[in-house]
């Protein structure tokens, strides 16, 4: 019998020998074996048990209270299947960030078909924009409309012909100042029927716009800074992806100031409204920094971007929120946390090659039958034929019927094997008689 003595130094307190210190050692191995924690955590079950515990009314009969509440829930859900579609139940209830979808037969321009809705149905307040702000908003809508992009190229070529030595900054300045007037005169005087749809934008928007305190778009719920004051949640952070990524340009981060709905004359097409966000942007050079190792983004709230372009389309906005650092050395910086939209998922458009496809990935098979021949595989597509064509194909196969040589060789080989087996059995019988 072997007795082991473990000597514990007096400097180590007894509290050291608990699970918390050793848990850190095993977390790395647990992550490698178990994978991501969201696939194996107990939060879902604990939340379900918590909801069942809240249904208890008589603590003397806990199980009976839970069973009774569960039956009431099941019966109410079953009865709601027979209600009218106009009655709101848990089966037809709209999602939290629900936005109505546009119909496929809608003939309006792409900027008018943004899937969105206001925070409150009747919370919009009509106001009048100044001429300078209205010109900036209208110009931004024209430059970001898909149907207007050919005319933008035409205007750029015209400016380059008149001013061959103009740079990109000067070209942007010409677009912001002159493109709206040039586009209006060109479309209104054109006799081409393809430009009839663009007359809605060329006629310029209405003077009065509708202002909202919040907006649902792209699966996010946005609040303006004024509406979000005093709230525990922060829904006014906005992120817009840059046009190009280089050393001096990347994503733009800011705060939402106003939500505007700019309306145009529909000319029989319906309500033509473009939702816009007016934002305060942080300086992308001195106010934004990115950690090259961990790709963490920090912004300096006191560093603002000096730009004459405060508007963006609501369809371009992504939501972020900013978290201040507890350290005093980083009190001038906020950490940027990007949120995921509710009910919106990004799917890969490209299918990986066969070399990168693993055993655990499944893809839909093509409608091709692989006929295995002697030396190679032949791919024959599926063809639908009628009954008469099927009979003709059968007759052709009957006329061209032949016997394969390989089948004769196999039969001869089987017969020879059968004869050899019979001879072996006869020899065994004679040996047993002897």
Image (tube, rainbow, N blue to C red):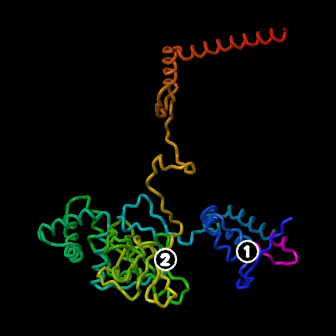
Q: How would you classify the magenta stretch by its main secondary structure?
A: helix
Task: Quadrant for residue 134, please give it.
Answer: bottom left
Instruction: Please rate how many residues cluster around mark 2, counting C-alpha atoms within 10 Å: few if below 14, some from 14 to 19, many from 20.
Output: some
Res 50 label: 1
Q: Is residue 165 left or right of residue 108?
A: left
Q: Secondary structure at mark 2?
A: strand
Q: Nearer the viewer, mark 1 or mark 2?
A: 2
Quadrant containing the N terminus is bottom right
Q: Where residue 265 sits: x, y (%)? A: 33, 72
Quarter assignment of residue 75: bottom right
Is 89 on the left or on the right of 330, as rendered? Answer: right
> How many angstroms separate mark 1 from mark 2 (CA)?
30 Å
Callout 1 crowding tier (Cα within 10 Å): few <14, some 14–19, many ≥20:
few
Rendered view: 280 above or below 360: below
The residue furthest front is: 2
Q: Position of residue 412 (x, y in %)?
A: 61, 12
Residue 50 location (% of width, % of height): 73, 74
Q: Which residue is mark 2?
A: 337
The quadrant of the rendering that contains the C terminus is top right
């Amino acid at each position: 019998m072997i007795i082991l003595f473990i000597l514990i130094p007096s400097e180590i307190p007894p509290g050291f020998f608990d699970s918390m210190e050793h848990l850190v050692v095993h977390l790395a191995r647990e992550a490698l074996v178990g994978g991501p924690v969201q696939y194996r955590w107990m939060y879902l079950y604990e939340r379900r048990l918590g909801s069942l515990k809240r249904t208890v009314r008589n603590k003397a009969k806990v199980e009976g209270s839970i069973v009774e509440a569960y039956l009431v829930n099941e019966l109410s859900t079953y009865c709601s299947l027979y209600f009218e579609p106009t009655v709101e139940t848990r089966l037809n209830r709209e999602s939290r960030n629900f936005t109505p979808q546009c119909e496929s037969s809608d003939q309006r321009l792409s900027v008018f078909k943004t899937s969105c809705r206001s925070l409150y149905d009747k919370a919009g307040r009509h106001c009048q924009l100044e001429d300078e702000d209205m010109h900036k908003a209208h110009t931004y809508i024209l430059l970001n409309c898909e149907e207007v992009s050919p005319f933008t190229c035409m205007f750029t070529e015209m400016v380059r012909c008149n001013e061959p030595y103009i740079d990109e900054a000067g070209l942007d300045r010409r677009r912001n100042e002159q493109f709206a007037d040039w586009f209006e005169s060109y479309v209104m005087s054109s006799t081409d029927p393809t430009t009839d749809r663009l007359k809605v934008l060329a006629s310029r928007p209405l003077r009065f716009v509708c202002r909202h305190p919040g907006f649902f778009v792209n699966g996010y719920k946005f609040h303006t800074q004024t509406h979000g004051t005093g709230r525990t949640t922060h829904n006014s952070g906005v992120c817009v992806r840059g046009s190009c990524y280089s050393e001096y340009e990347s994503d733009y981060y800011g705060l939402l100031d106003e939500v505007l709905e700019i309306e145009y004359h529909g000319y029989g097409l319906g309500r033509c409204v473009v939702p816009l966000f007016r934002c305060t942007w942080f300086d992308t050079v001195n106010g934004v920094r990115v950690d090259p190792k961990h790709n963490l983004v920090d912004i300096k709230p006191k560093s603002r971007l000096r730009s004459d372009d405060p508007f963006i389309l609501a369809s371009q906005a992504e939501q972020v929120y900013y978290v201040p650092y507890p350290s005093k050395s980083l009190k001038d910086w906020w950490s940027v946390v990007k949120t995921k939209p509710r009910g919106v998922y990004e799917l890969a458009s490209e299918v990986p090659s066969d070399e990168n496809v693993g055993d655990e990935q499944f893809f839909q098979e093509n409608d091709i039958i692989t006929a295995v021949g002697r030396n190679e595989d032949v791919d024959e597509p599926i063809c639908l034929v009628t009954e008469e064509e099927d009979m003709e194909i059968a007759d052709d196969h009957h006329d061209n019927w032949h016997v394969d040589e390989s089948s004769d060789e196999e039969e001869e080989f089987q017969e020879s094997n059968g004869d050899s087996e019979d001879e072996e059995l006869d020899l065994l019988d004679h040996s047993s008689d002897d």
